[in-house]
Structure formats: structure tokens, C-alpha cells
Amino acid sequence: MAKLGKRTAAAREAFAGKSNLTVEEAVALVKSNANAKFDETIEIAMNLGVDTRHADQMVRGVIGLPNGTGKTMRVAVFARGPKAEEAQAAGADIVGAEDLMETVQGGTIDFDRCIATPDMMPVVGRLGKVLGPRNLMPNPKVGTVTMDVKAAVEAAKGGEVQFKAEKGGVVHAGVGKASFDEAKLVENVRAFVGAVSKAKPAGAKGAYMKSITLTSTMGPGVTISVDNAASE
């Protein structure tokens, strides 16, 4: 068995025997043990009581975190004419139409969020098998198929987070950086949990939020009390 490094061993010792903490306690513990040489992302994972094989149990949505994510988002926009100019003016990193489609088909996906005007969806639709598995396919339900390109780009750049339940009913996202103040991380965690709670599908049966775990990029995870996280 490989010997644990001093940092890993110390982190495991700090986390030992701790579970079902308050949001404040979990944030303090995870943040204090995020000691990597880079600014680690604070990540949340929620295990939901849903079966994503059924359409009426799919969970997806979008939330503008009150304190942003700390991540620089690269945004691509499929648009033509004035809307393409609007996207560029709003700060989109990549703007195009058929040319952008060909670039993506060729295997170059140099963006974290994809936005499209409704008229471009026949073009973007050809990229379903490429963008879909990466959760990058524009969708009107989360505001990425829209004529208000300016607002969509600004929201993506400003810390908006999309979420979608994966196989097994798990939703996960980055909710800030280890360099954030504890109070800001707590606010972001509660905002994200609140958004997932409000996205509860009609077909969900039994307990909806089964468990919540908080971790940093390189650190151990700790569970948060579902009742505490869901309260204001």
C-alpha cells in the first residue's frame, strides 16, 4: 500500500469522524484543508432520489451564484449578423455559425458554455452527439437558446452555474474557490442547494435530497446535514 503524503495524511486526520455538519462547519473544514499549490475549487455533490431514466424525474436548472464561481468562463455563441455583433460586444470568446459548427465537429471545443439564437438551432443540432455528453448543448430551459444574447453571455461570465442530474441522480458543481471568504462560500452553497431544491421534478418520490457532500479539488469530502443545507 502506498504511503500517504504528509498533506493527505493530515487532511484525512482532520476529517476523521466528521459527518452531517452544518454548511458553516463543512465550509470551514474544507477550506482550511485546501492546501494545494493552486486555488482549489470548492465542489458540491448532491445525491438525489430521482431516476433520470424517466423524463418526469429529470433535474436540471441554472443558478447565478451570489458570489460567482471564481472560474473564468469561455463562452461560445452561435449567431449571425447583429446578434453575432451583440455577442462579441458582450464579451463572448468565440462567435460563429457554420464555421463554428465545423470547428466543433473537427474536435476543437475551446469553451465552457455554449449559447445559440433560436434560428441557429438547426445548425447546432448537428452537434448533439458532441456537445450533449459534455453538457454543452444549448437549451431554452436554462436560457442558452435565446434572442437576448447579451444577457446570456453576461450571466455566463458572471458566475452562472448550470446543473443537471447525471446517471444515478447525482448533481455536482463548483461553488467557489478556496480563496473565497467562508461567508461567501456558505452563501453560494446555500444558493445552489436552494436552486436544486426548487428544481424538484413532479415525478420524484420519497426523499428528494438524500445526501450532500462538500470537497475541494485535492481534498477529502465531508457530508453536510441535508436539513441544515436546505434551511435559510
Image: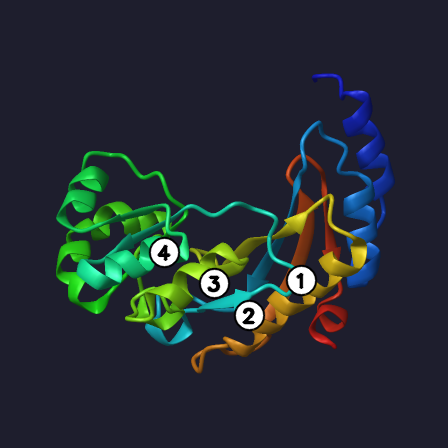
Proximity of marks 3 and 1: CB atoms separated by less than 8 Å? no
Residue type, label 4: Ala
Picture quarter containing residue 65? Answer: bottom right
Residue designated by label 2: 196
Tag 2 or tag 1, which sits nearer the N-term?
1
Residue 231 visible at all: yes
Q: How far apart in space, not on screen, are marks 3 and 1 (Cα)?
A: 16 Å
Between residues 7 and 162, which one lies in front from this camera angle? 162
Q: Is residue 66 left or right of residue 98?
A: right
Residue designated by label 3: 155
What residue is drawn where x is 57% and y is 60%? Answer: 47
Q: How far apart in space, not on screen, are marks 3 and 4 (Cα)?
A: 14 Å
Residue type, label 2: Val
User: Could you classify mark 3 by the number of other residues whose Cα lies within 10 Å: few (under 14), some (14-19), or many (20 or more)?
Assistant: some
Residue designated by label 1: 188
Tag 3 or tag 2, which sits nearer the N-term?
3
**Image disc number at residue 89:** 4
Q: Is residue 142 above or below residue 4?
A: below
